[in-house]
Image (spheres, grey):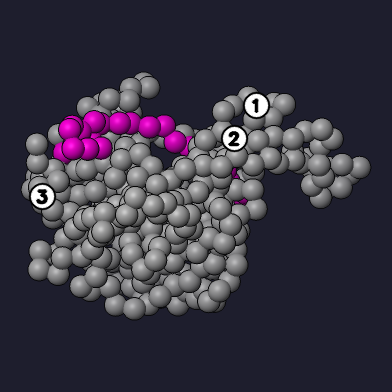
Amino acid sequence: MILRIKPITNPIFSRRPFSSPDYIASHSVWEIPPPTTVAGTLGDALGITIPTNESSKLLGLDKLSEKLNEKLTEPCGIPFSITGPLLETEGRYFVPIGEGVFLPVQYDNVKKIAVIGDQNKAKLIHGTERRVGVSLKRGYNQSEEKVGRSGMHYRYLVSVYEMVENEKKRPVLPNYVYKLTGCQGSGNIQQKRAIRFGGEGGIAFLEINRSKEEDSIFSAMFSPLSNLEQGCYLALSPIPLIPKHGNSSHISEVTGLEPFGGPSSVRGICDERSCKVKVVRMGLGFSEVYKSRRPQILALPQGTLLEVSDKHGSNNSKVLKVLYSLGFASLLKVGDELCQD
């Protein structure tokens, strides 16, 4: 099954909360939707509710994973997972290469891999635009409705994308496309249904296409929950890491790389000159159900290259398995030459 999210407003995927009288911060945004945002939006579209009377280390993410599995799949032994995204615009798919840069990708039916090519040397560039908002509060005159705080304005950023082709730039608003792995279930999303997506009142249309995935780019998309073949992979979404002790962020001292072959499998984010391993800190979002912010984790960012060995293992962490099912560590199999020195 293919999930397609079509934003109709410039999306906002905040890295940290906005500045306010209580919290001072420099606002910045992610280039792609965080997996927890996508999973929550899908759950909302399917009418999934999460009970708050049960304890949850991930503030409902584990319950959301279970209910998505129940709603969208049927018992058949295939683990449910969301895999992606691919950015879709003008009939082409794009994948992350470097920070804020996306290149076109095609599927090689013979080698069964994704080929990241020039396709007329086109590329997508992610940028931001600054907007002004009004701070809101609840409970004014014992009302549950939100009202504006007098004089409390703030500035925030929205994501914008530009297509660069033939030395010309033009604005585009790409779709985010995901592969839903599992069995064909009974979940149903009505076509052209508008739903909240991202922050600041962002809206998107959601649709699920049950067309065949064989011999298409989706055949090269994988989750760590499946058995990965040996080869070179590109991370389409952040790869979560958990420190083994303390606050260490070095890849030799974290859990989460076992499905790929350990720290030696990480090539990093590469350009024509070199590869650099980068570890970022990211939050798991705000829970509207629990009215609380979820914890932060370490992650390898999207665009990281991994060389999966034939001796890779698995990870027994329940937390990581939940995150994998919701779209973290989505991988695209690419040509081995991309992982060569």
- Position of 148 compared to 109: left or right? right
> From mark 2 to mark 1, how far is it between C-alphas?
8 Å
Q: Position of residue 285 (x, y in %)?
A: 52, 43
Mark seen at residue 23: 1
Amino acid carrying mark 2 in the image = Pro
Q: Amino acid at mark 1?
A: Tyr
Please report whichever mark, 1 or 3, sits nearer to the chain's N-terminal start. Answer: 1
Of the residues tagged 1 and 3, which is closer to the observer? 3
Mark identifier at residue 218: none
Q: Is residue 145 left or right of residue 244?
A: right
Identify the element where label 1 is drawn.
loop
Q: Quick check: marks 2 and 1 in contact, CB under 8 Å? A: yes
Quadrant location of the C terminus in the rendered image: top left
Tell me, yes or no, if residue 53 can be seen here: no
Callout 3–callout 2 Cβ contact below 8 Å: no
Circle 2 Cα neighbour tier, 10 Å, few/some/many (<14 / 14–19 / ≥20): some
Start and end of the magenta stretch?
265-289
In front: 263, or 64?
263
The percent coordinates of residue 48 (x first, y second) are 56, 64
Name the residue that disc number 3 marks: 336
Spatial CA span between label 3 and label 2: 39 Å
Secondary structure of the residue carrying numbered label 3: helix
Name the one closer to the observer, 163 or 298. Answer: 163
Q: Nearer the viewer, residue 233 or 62?
A: 233
Which residue is depicted at the point 13% across and 53% down? 335
